[in-house]
Image (tube, rainbow, N blue to C red):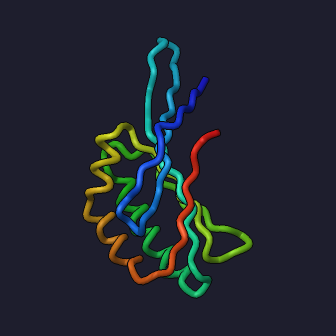
Amino acid sequence: MINIAAKGLRQSRLHNIFVSEIYFTQGDHMNQQRRSIGVHLRMTCAPLEADSLLSALQDLQRLSREEPGNRMFDILQCCEHAGGFLVLEEFENEAALATHRASDQFRRFKEATASLTLTIERYAPV
């Protein structure tokens, strides 16, 4: 059984993005719990900027998946709007998330997308 609890919303310095941090706990057969943090973003840009945003996201994804404590980094592209992306991340703990946000690849992502016109939406469990 998986339990989900919202930790709250935090404002990131990246394009004034708000991200939801969701804690997942999952009990195993020994009655131990595993806790992780999920970050869910919807990023939208102009269709002509979609290739640039996707390229920056894929670079970030590739390197982030190698980080210790990263359990998931998935990118979904909207079928109806080329500039629409959903980013789903999961980290083992707060330290892993903090390390990710302080990483060189995260800094490079911010630099690569600074000139794009982005709309960012946050998602949290209800």
Q: Residue at x 46, y 81 (%)?
A: 116
Q: What is the tally of numbered marks visible in this picture?
A: 0
Viewer-side residue, 73 vs 49: 49
Which one is in front, 48 or 8? 8
Residue 82 coordinates in the image, percent (x, y):
65, 77
In the rendered image, which quarter contains the C terminus?
top right
The residue at the far top in this view is 30
- Residue 103 in the image, given as x and y percentages of width and height: 27, 59
**Along the horizontal axis of the image, is 126 left or right of 71?**
right
- 105 lies above or below 72: below
Q: Is residue 5 above or below residue 122?
A: above
Percent of width and height locating residue 17: 45, 62
**Quick one: which residue is furthest to the bottom in this view?**
48
Residue 72, above or below 26: below
Quarter location, residue 36 = top left
Quadrant for the N terminus in the image: top right
* Residue visible at 62% across and 83% down in the picture: 47
In the drawing, does residue 28 fall left or right of residue 95?
Answer: right
Q: Kindly identify the residue that appears in the image at 33 percent across and 76 percent down.
A: 111
**Residue positioned 40% across, 62% down in the render:** 62
Q: Position of residue 20 (x, y in %)?
A: 50, 48
Question: Eyeballing the image, is 7 above or below 10?
Answer: above
